[in-house]
Image (spheres, coloured by chain):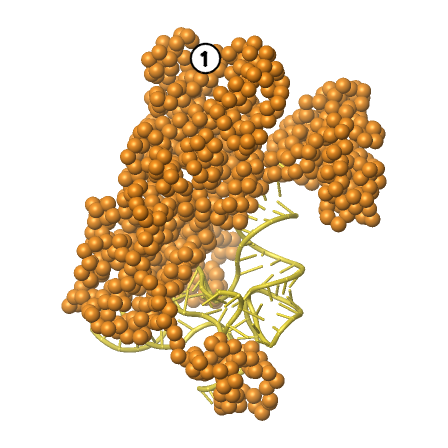
Chain colours: A orange, B yellow
Amino acid sequence: MQYNFNDIEAKWQKYWAENQTFKASNTSDKPKYYVLDMFPYPSGAGLHVGHPLGYIASDIYARYQRHKGFNVLHPQGYDSFGLPAEQYAIQTGQHPAITTETNIKTYRRQLDQIGFSFDWSREVRTSNPEYYKWTQWIFIQLFESYYCNDDNKAKDISELISIFSSEGNTNVNVACDDDIETFSAEAWNGKNSEAQQEILLKYRLTYLAETEVNWCPALGTVLANDEIVNGVSERGGHPVVRKKMTQWSMRISAYAERLLQGLENIDWTDSLKETQRNWIGKSVGATVSFNVKEHDENIEVFTTRPDTIFGVSFMTLAPEHELVSKLTTVAQKEAVNAYIEKSAKRSERDRMADVKTISGVFTGAYAEHPFTKEPIQIWIGDYVLASYGTGAVMAVPCGDQRDYDFATHFEIEIPNIFEGVDISNEAFTGKDNVKIANSDFLNGMNYKKASKRAIYDLEQLGQGEGKTNYRLRDAVFSRQRYWGEPFPVYYVNGMPQMIAAQHLPIKLPEVEKYLPTEEGEPPLGRADVWAWDTESNTVVSNDKINNTTIHQLELNTMPGWAGSSWYFFHYMEEANRDGVFASEDALKYWENVDLYIGGAEHATGHLLYSRFWVKLLKDRGFVNVEEPFKKLINQGMILGTSAFVVEALYEGKSLNVYESYNLIEGPNYITSESPKWNELREIYRSKGLEEEDFSKVTNRLIHCDVSFVNASDELDIDAFKNWRAEFKDAIFLRDQDGVFKVKREVEKMSKSKYNVVNPDQIVADYGADSLRLYEMFLGPLEQYKPWNTAGISGVHSFLKKLWKLYVDDTGLKVNDAEPTKDNLKTLHKTIKKVQEDIENFSFNTSVSTFMIAVNELGAQKCTSKDILEPLLVLISPYAPHIAEELYSKLGNTVSISTTAFPTFDASHLVESSKNYPISFNGKMRFTLELPMDMSKEDIEKTVLAHEKTIAQLEGRTPKKVIVVPGKIVNIVG
RNA sequence: GCUGAAGUGGUGGAAUUGGUAGACACGUUGGACUUAAAAUCCAAUGUCCCUUGGGACGUACGGGUUCAAGUCCCGUCUUCAGUACCA
């Protein structure tokens, strides 16, 4: 009987689907375990072999946990709103919903054929109105919330309103905008509704405000900070400019401290936590207020080193700082304006790239030192960023290298306030093991003490206070795009109003084109039916807008991360998905995700926003957990192995002649003495080149499709010729041995590099079990590693060997034979290793372990069911189809997934003897079989008496003999 | 620049608390079977020296600790990732 993997895999995939084998129940006595993959964006290109890597790992873990007696939730879905579908819609007019649906079908087919144990009954799609209804609902909760710093949690905005109406805002300690004016209860109560709403927007956790945003003209939308990489858009690499726009923002900054602290309690990689810590960017210090001489103004700065306050010798403002124009003296006006103009022209990117050049201008104005009252020059310089802190710094050149460089460059005084430190060459930036000097009341104190004291004295003067600053900015939440969640918002007199939850979802309207309007409004501005009727509570035609009962709806849509910030909760809900985002019982049972697997690229986007929304939902009493993902693993990327053909060029133009790579590099390098030389000469002549032109021929490597190349790097020339018209008449110069080799190189897997390997082909040729095993066998999960299809034959022949252990030409070989000691030893060491490996997420080593076990059992001619049946359970998380098939052949009528994981019994591994390595001065020379229970002394005696030992020593007396029982013997001397 | 991770055969990689470096595969070479091919099976395969036996050298590089170092310590180099005038 053959191992007919295609039939077997189809059969079991059908069985699992029909029997709902992997459907999770919300009511179970078993302990729960929630395994989640970052859900995919269904792109038009479908899956390549790199995509399923993480899914295979999580599937192995999910299946293992089922064997271990857990009730496992392992769902899957689609992050189906997004830019590519919309860009495609703009080009073709095809509705994004249609493309998305088609793409999802492809994804589903591809996922199904790999044999994942997903519970598809719980699928979510972020672009389904039934789903985004709840995304809109959460948005409303954010709008209806403010953050109380005293209680460290979000609360209902109505509580804040009642505080305002009873005592005003003078005593509230809550997260809000910077430009808040204080008001009394009377003042509040005297304001009209619009004025009150305007103030409340400054407190809500999602708010509408004119903010400076990252506008990407090519994409026609704004982008969040995490969507910009190196100054260009993450998607497409388009330039981004700063622009002021009225936008919805998320007050994530209110949660900065909790997002930071929460990292302590979750099991994520250090690098990921570190990335989030950097993004949050906490710095502890103080604000200091400097009075400006001859002006009724003061300059606020933030410093992390209040202890160095007496080292201040000048101040620097960002060129954009609002006080610059007020303070600049007449004499300096021209120079200052010229500088401002110059730096405004430089993009943010240029400013960042050019760190070396020191530039700045003196404003002519002076501030006053809060303690010494000495005058301090006020400069402007673009090393100070308007967007961080207060946009101004107190410059302490002796303690900060940038200030030092600036001071040196402009010959500003550099007072030394560190005891016994030489600052003649560079600033002293450390803060440990140094005492403050020349600093009045701070003299002799260390960093900690001096900082405390400085803050205290500043507070006494009313010119400063301790402050913690965060780099984390509020996240812009509006996108000027079509294919995203509509906001449940309409406008009355310019003030946003929420649509009541019972009227959700507000569905995306139809538009005739997916482009912005001529007036520059977002695509929803093209919708004809996009107004809110407050009487019928329905979306109605725009021409009915009367601004009394029928109002304009919001034209922006939500960003990609909205739907993915809470989807893990919706999977928990089975029955009442329309009535709740997840029911109380479901939330209580499943809590949060135990294991989350996905790419590291989401470190500062999805993974931060999800944590933020979960904290908000917890504060408002909707969920019980503080963090969404307990343990998180980033799978590494699978890289492609590109193939290159060597093309001959003359004067930069292709000769349409291609040479085997062996002739270009390596021992067969072609020279005028090579046997191939004459052939090459003929070819060049036929192309009209003269002998003296030959040396001007150069080579270029061009990508060729990897499917034309075999495991030995040989090109299928016919396939290549048929690939593109221009290769039809190409001439190929082969090696001496008649083959044509290509150059291989590892690169990111991508269409443009022609190195994409489609899992469909692998599954058809080798089967899903082979694909699963091979992806794991490639190396550690977290590591980047190249794909090489040739290697899959190893795991495939392993599966064939496994099959043959159970089945031969006549049928089933397995019998009730009593297992031998060796059989049991092989089985139990495999149980032990595989269990350890899975728990350590070391899936690659398990595959080797299976290979060893099958090789050993084959050599032992094992046919015992007591061995071979448990072996199937060990393998089934990795290669579930073959395991199910053989398991049923053994007479079982239930799925192998319901079988308990075999129990490890150490007694089978107890050895009576050990093959000791005998080393001389640490170098192993030979091995010696000795009984396990032999004493140290006896081992030493036996080894020293051995003839090989005597030969090694050549008459020398050993100085020392180290015996580690059960491990090693080392003879020194 | 800073932070983090990594560097082991021709290739992917393995090696528990320091204890036989290179498991398991791929590839390569040779062989068996076959008219032939595929498939399968067997053997060899870190480098160098050498007739077997064996020896020397080997985990990026240079030091060190130790009876013993891929593993621990110090320094250097390289690669990858993140981040960057953050006051």
Residue A797 higher or lower than A7, as above or below: below
Labels in figure, total: 1
User: Front-most of A30 and B41?
Assistant: A30
Q: Chain of mark 1?
A: A
> Where residue A857 sits in the image (x, y, percent)?
29, 71
The residue positioned 31% from the left and 71% from the top of the image is A824
Q: Decide which of A189, A752 is in the foreground and name it.
A: A189
Residue A874 in the image, given as x and y percentages of width and height: 32, 60
Quarter of the figure with the C terminus of chain A? bottom right
A345 or A558, nearer to the observer: A558
- Residue at numbered disc 1: A492
Disc 1 residue crowd, few under 14, some 14–19, many 20+, Cα 10 Å: some
- Give the residue at the far left of this rendering: A810
Residue A921 percent coordinates (x, y): 57, 80
Residue at x 80%, y 39% (from the top left corner): A442
Secondary structure beneath disc 1?
strand
Q: Using the image as rendered, state which of residue A87 and residue A968 is in the foreground.
A: A968
Residue A681 screen position, x and y as percent: 44, 59
